[in-house]
Amino acid sequence: MKRYPVALSVAGSDPSGGAGIQADLKTFSALGVYGAAAVTAITVQNTKGVKYVHSVPAQVVYDQIVAVMEDLHPDAVKIGMVNDAATLDAIIKALTDCRPHFLVVDPVMVSSSGKMLMSSGALTLLEKKLLPMTDLLTPNIPETSVLTGMPSVSANDVEAAARAILDYGTRSVLIKGGHASGSVKTDVLFSILDGNISLNEYSAPSVASRNTHGTGCTLSSAIAAFVARGNSLVEAVGEAKRYLTSALAAGADITIGDGTGPLNHFFSPVPAIVIDKE
């Protein structure tokens, strides 16, 4: 029997299509992976900003995840924006009842203006219950500061910050360097292997573009897609980084909306991948 590799996104909906589950599903599809989605919140936003967020009832979030997990059996699950404790608790319970093969968490905590997006109760649940279940956490520099309590995280502080995050119980952490200045952006992957911490760096040239909406969503969902396709984590991060850089470059000269536009997710789409069912 044949099947598609499957990835599930658990995240908020972006009606403008640049971020959230829309970006995740575009990424999965562009990389040849069958995408499923459980909606955690309905956002009212466009390229110019978020107007407000309407949360989906926690039980409905739980039921969506379980329905997909019991039937489609995703090869990878990606968790995106969750700002309240009740919703995050429902997600944790669903993933406890239906444990995924691979879980990547993109901890959307801080807005581009520096506003805290995650409630204190949700942050506590993330640290105490979700991170010990997580195979890969993908924080940017501001999110790394929140998780570690470090007021700033420079290149010299990245390893210490990673060790502090790994102490929560997550198996790997990818600290993203997109907020750093310079002509090259470097992400650093730290993983625990046989009790020791391994390090892998992924560098790419900076892309001059105002169309950066959904970069974090796209990277984490691309990693999930490549893992679903059978790549190792180290390989998946490298492939996802290359995909993100190309999507940024391909969309740099396109105008969609009057604000921060989206990437070009379909610059070189892969046909749906078919694999032997185990």
Image (cartoon, rainbow, N blue to C red):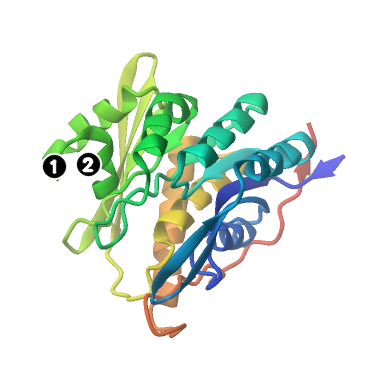
Question: In front here: 173 or 40?
Answer: 40
Q: Residue at x 51, y 52 (%)?
A: 222
Seen in the picture, residue 110 relative to 167 is either above or below; the reply is below
Quarter that holds the C terminus: top right
Question: Mark 2 highlights which residue?
Answer: 145
Q: Is residue 213 left or right of residue 182?
A: right
Q: Give 56 or 221, whichever is nearer the viewer.
A: 56
Question: Which residue corresponds to the image point at 39% horizontal and 14% vertical from the top-left?
Answer: 194
**Label 2 secondary element:** helix
Which x, y percent locates residue 95?
60, 31
**Closer to the camera in the image, 210 or 124:** 124
Mark yes or no: residue 41 visible. Answer: yes
Q: Position of residue 212 (x, y in %)?
A: 37, 68
Does residue 7 appear left or right of residue 119 in this picture? right
- How far apart in space, not on screen, are marks 2 and 1 (Cα)? 6 Å
Q: Quadrant of residue 77?
A: top right
Q: Viewed as shown, does residue 156 lie left or right of 218?
A: left
Instruction: Residue 200: give x, y in percent of width and height.
Output: 32, 37
Residue 152 in picture, x, y percent from top left:
14, 44
Badge 1 element = loop
Q: Residue beneath label 1, please?
A: 151
Whether label 2 touches label 1, CB < 8 Å: yes
Q: Is residue 227 visible?
A: no
Badge 1 amino acid: Pro
Does 158 appear above or below 14? above
